[in-house]
Amino acid sequence: MKIRSGFVSNSSSSSFVMIAFEIKKSNELFEWLCKDVMKLTKEEISEFTDNVEYKTLECCGSIPQGNFCAACGKQAIKEEVPISWEDICEEHIWECNEKMGFDVRIDTEDGSPNDNVILLGKTLAEGMEEEGEIKIEDFEEIMNDIKKLRNNNKILEGCKLSMFYGNYAC
């Protein structure tokens, strides 16, 4: 009997080829994706912004309950946790890929080259178990769509546009 040592996984993966911008992650990037690319409504964004979280700061080593610390009697200080556009983006990205007409690969599990960048572009092929083709006319249309996205967009200035291929977790 053979015994396998090391990493063993039951997860499956799929391959992809895409033309995309490689963009360094930033709060500004995620805000732009949410508002301008995915065109999230105020209601979709407010699901996160209306539920403002507060972090209660410790005073004497105890975590205060309510407005005052039961252990030392000091007033509890609450600090507002800033909105994370990345969290909003990640929550809505899958439902919005079709809506926005572009594909986003947000982390390495999803096919991004590393966790500090995202890929934003068009997938040419996915799950390539069989042969396929892309007509030159279709490819030119894809390239035109991607170039329109770059026009007058400071977020994409200096971002490399490349063909990426790889695997992502299913």
Image (cartoon, grey):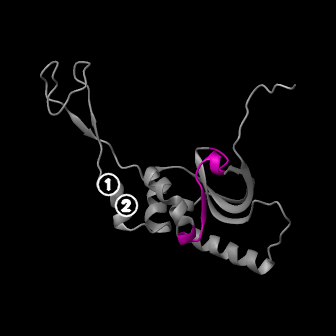
Look at mark 2 in the image and give the residue it sits on.
45
x and y percentages locating residue 86 in the rendered image = 46, 51
The secondary structure type at the circle numbered 2 is helix
- Is 71 magenta? The answer is no
The secondary structure type at the circle numbered 1 is helix
Q: Local crowd at mark 2 within 10 Å, few (<14), some, or many (≥20)?
A: some
- Is 104 magenta? The answer is yes
Q: Amino acid at mark 1?
A: Thr
x and y percentages locating residue 30 in the rendered image = 47, 55
Numbered range of the magenta stretch: 98-114
Q: Amino acid at mark 2?
A: Ile
Look at mark 1 in the image and give the residue it sits on.
49
Q: Identify which residue, 93 or 1, lies in the foreground.
A: 1
Picture quadrant where residue 129 is located: bottom right
Q: Local crowd at mark 1 within 10 Å, few (<14), some, or many (≥20)?
A: some
Q: Is residue 4 left or right of residue 95?
A: right
x and y percentages locating residue 93 in the rendered image = 52, 59
